[in-house]
Amino acid sequence: MPDQILSQEEIDALLGAIRKGEVSLEEEKAPKEGVKPYDLTSQSLSLRAQYGALEEVYDRFITGLRNSLSTFFQQDFEVTVISREIVKFSEVLKGLTFPSYIDIFAMEPLFGMAIFVIEPQLLFSFLDVMFGGKGKPLDKIRPFTALELNSLKKITNLILSNWEDAWTEINPLRIVHKKTEMKPEFIHMIDPSDFVISVVFSVDAKEYSGMLNLCIPYLMLEPIKEKLSYAYLRKKEVEAGWNEALRQLLNQVSVELVAELGNITLSLDRVMRLKENDVIRLDKGPDDPISLKVQGVSKYLVMPGTFKGNKAVKVIGVVNSKGL
């Protein structure tokens, strides 16, 4: 018989304490910890609302890229957004293989780097068209040659130029190409654990198609997040509406225009002694331009004359803030 942990006497004492309620049978709950894990991916909906203005950037980019590709290749293109999500960069890297075409660029003055990943099959179709073909895709993907990489710089510049133009209305940025990589393991400027905004675009021509993946580090947009919210966009729209209404109202306001022939400074005594037929010599000659004032402020230089029997002036210049 195995050794007992408690003696019979101790067991009887414990059972008695339980009957009297001196010992609780309920399991003690662990105290709540002060720090709770925060899963950023669970906040994807609120983040999309926070960065809602990016949808306008995507729309402008799509329109610009479609037009640029159509002009460059003399073909019709369709560019659409396939997906948009916030993921860890490690998830993006898992989907990349060698060879990839990864364009790394800065969005100055924002801190950090972003990337465009262009599907190799799409690029080989582009190259085929550039060299006289119809865009036939390769049966087997291979690394790009030096000549092909040099030719693809035109496509890279075209994409980055349209991405820069897409930001003009929201927050003007300067897009600067840094380098191109074909091996995903060489991408060290974005930490695999960092969250990125990943947007996949589909580029479709008649004979071929492919994907374009944009990845922007979430923290990269932090300095301008206020401008990227739907609330900020609505505020701008309201302000634009008021500005247009005010502009239309101001256009209907009547203002007084006075053509000033000239001026001279006289003493009060001289003014008091003026009489009929006195001649006052002004500071302007008969062939000198004179000032046309709007509500008392000089705005134009004009030449005096007559038009259809009435005195008139002809505008010959605009007075700037410095007076000329």
Image: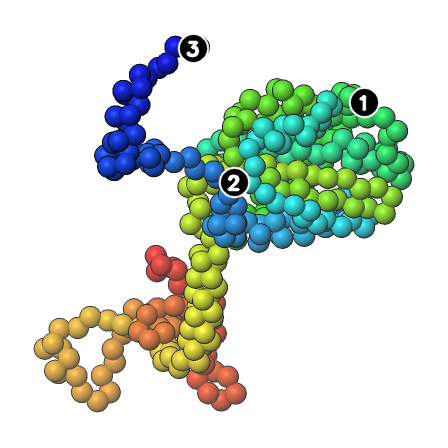
Above or below, 81 relative to 305: above
| Foreground tag (3 vs 2) | 3
Marks 2,1: beta carbons within 8 A: no
Percent coordinates x, y for residue 184 in the rendering: 65, 23
Tell me the number on the disc at residue 129. Answer: none
Q: Examine the rendered structure and indicate whether residue 13 appears above or below residue 171.
A: above
For marks 3 and 1, give the CA distance: 72 Å
Image quadrant assignment for residue 319:
bottom left
Residue type, label 3: Pro
CA separation in Å, label 3 and label 2: 55 Å
Q: Looking at the image, is mark 2 or mark 1 earlier in the sequence?
A: 2
Return the residue nearer the eye: 306 or 84.
84
Q: What's the amino acid at mark 1?
A: Arg
Tag 3 near tag 2, CB within 8 Å: no
Q: Is residue 279 left or right of residue 250?
A: left
Name the secondary structure under disc 2.
Answer: helix
The label nearer to you, 3 versus 1, is 3
Regarding residue 218, the answer to whether it shows in the image is yes
Numbered label attached to residue 41: 2
Q: Which residue is mark 1?
A: 142
Q: Nearer the viewer, mark 2 or mark 1?
A: 2
What secondary structure is found at the residue carrying circle 1?
loop
**Residue at screen point 88% across, 36% down:** 136
What residue would you read off at disc 3?
Answer: 2
